[in-house]
Image (cartoon, helix red, strand yellow):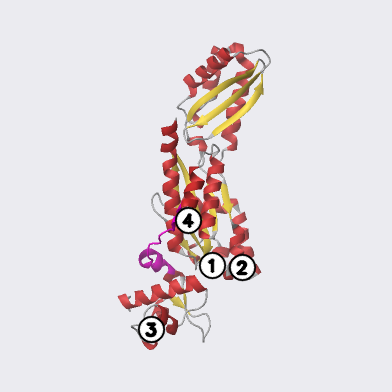
Amino acid sequence: MQMGDRKKKILKAIIQDYIETAEPVGSRSIAKRYIPDLSSATIRNEMADLEEMGYLAQPHTSAGRIPSDMGYRLFVDSLMRKYALSMQEMVHMQTVMEEKIQELDVLIERAARALTSVTQYTSIAMTPDVKKGRLMSMQIVYLQPHKVLLILVTEQGVMKNRIVHTDHEINSEQAYELSSMFNKFLAGLTLEEITLARINQIKAMMAQYGDIITQMVDFITEVIGENERNVLVQGSVNLLNLPEYSDIERAKDVLQFLENKETLSNILPQVAEDGVHVIIGHENPTLGMHGCSIVLYNYKLGKVGGSIGVVGPTRMDYSKVVAALEFLKSQMETLPDKDNAQD
């Protein structure tokens, strides 16, 4: 049996109606709301064919039809219309992304929060592997004779700082000299490339500042250690507002999945290099997520990147989610250029 244009039109209408109402869809509703030029009887026959082909399911004998995972897959791949974000939605996301945020994890967390706010689903994100980013500068700022401020800045805008106390006095000129030496030997390297051998080379040349150099090394080591890739989840409670999760057991399965950072960290890197990656229903490897869909995108911040996306029911508004992710991704990928322009 072939999937003709009429069947595609009816399937698209059924999915759109079910996304909106969360109620099984009948032929009369499709004829009245979407395709008035077809009779209910004709639509009913086509719906029976679509069910036989695997694109629809009938939850109860007397009920209308609902889309199957196979139906959603065809819809996402070739039937869904492009959603246009409202000006309010775009301004909201743009405002979040244009704030000057130094901490990368905070930036990604706010991006995920903006995504949740616009879509009303749960957002998930994997932060970049900062160890792959290059050190842009290492500054020692004089505060007091026995106190300096250490500042580490990476190329993608991550800034970490720490106040340290020194055993002997140091003046502003010496602080500048130390900064210059560190930048000469370390600037442009990834955090992974800042090896013990390189640090020892600096120590040998600047032996009189041994305690400061030791504290700087400890600081760099701490930054490397604390910036392992992290999985962020925003808006889990949104799922509880959806009729699909009025069943406590079903809701519990999804919430447990979202709490399992190890499982999420295995799913997030599966995103294709470019474009959207949609995992629908039974395509999810986790049993408890067979009633859910996950829509993911890769993002780039300078030379590092991660994944960000949305978790919701298979009934989710895929078109709006994809539009929100595309807009958010475009905003995130302009950030490095903006920062460089300001430097």
Whether residue 48 is in magenta: the answer is no
| Tag nearer the camera, 3 or 4 | 4
Q: Earlier in the sequence, mark 1 or mark 4?
A: 4
Residue 146 shown left or right of residue 117 in the figure: right
Element under disc 1: loop
Kindly identify which numbered label has been placed on residue 200: none
User: What kind of residue is marked 1?
Assistant: Gly
User: What kind of residue is marked 3?
Assistant: Ile
Q: Earlier in the sequence, mark 2 or mark 1?
A: 2
Q: Residue 254 or 240: which is nearer the viewer?
A: 240
Look at mark 4 in the image and give the residue it sits on: 89
Residue drawn 37% across the image and 65% down it: 81
Kindly identify which numbered label has been placed on residue 250: 2
The residue carrying pointer 2 sits among few (fewer than 14), some (14 to 19) or many (20 or more) residues within 10 Å by Cα, namely some
Above or below — where is 56 with respect to 142?
below
CA separation in Å, label 3 and label 4: 36 Å
Q: Residue 14 or 195: which is nearer the viewer?
A: 14
The residue carrying pointer 1 sits among few (fewer than 14), some (14 to 19) or many (20 or more) residues within 10 Å by Cα, namely many
Magenta region, residue range:
72-90
| Tag nearer the camera, 1 or 4 | 4
- Locate residue 147, reporting x and y percent: 66, 19
CA separation in Å, label 4 and label 2: 30 Å
Q: Residue 108 or 259: which is nearer the viewer?
A: 108
The residue carrying pointer 3 sits among few (fewer than 14), some (14 to 19) or many (20 or more) residues within 10 Å by Cα, namely many
Kindly identify which numbered label has been placed on residue 43: 3
The part of the image, by quadrant, that contains residue 117 is bottom right
- Locate residue 11, reporting x and y percent: 39, 75
Asked whether the beta carbons under mark 1 and mark 3 sit within 8 Å of each other, the answer is no
Q: Earlier in the sequence, mark 4 or mark 2?
A: 4
Asked whether the beta carbons under mark 2 and mark 1 sit within 8 Å of each other, the answer is yes
Secondary structure, magenta segment, majority class = helix
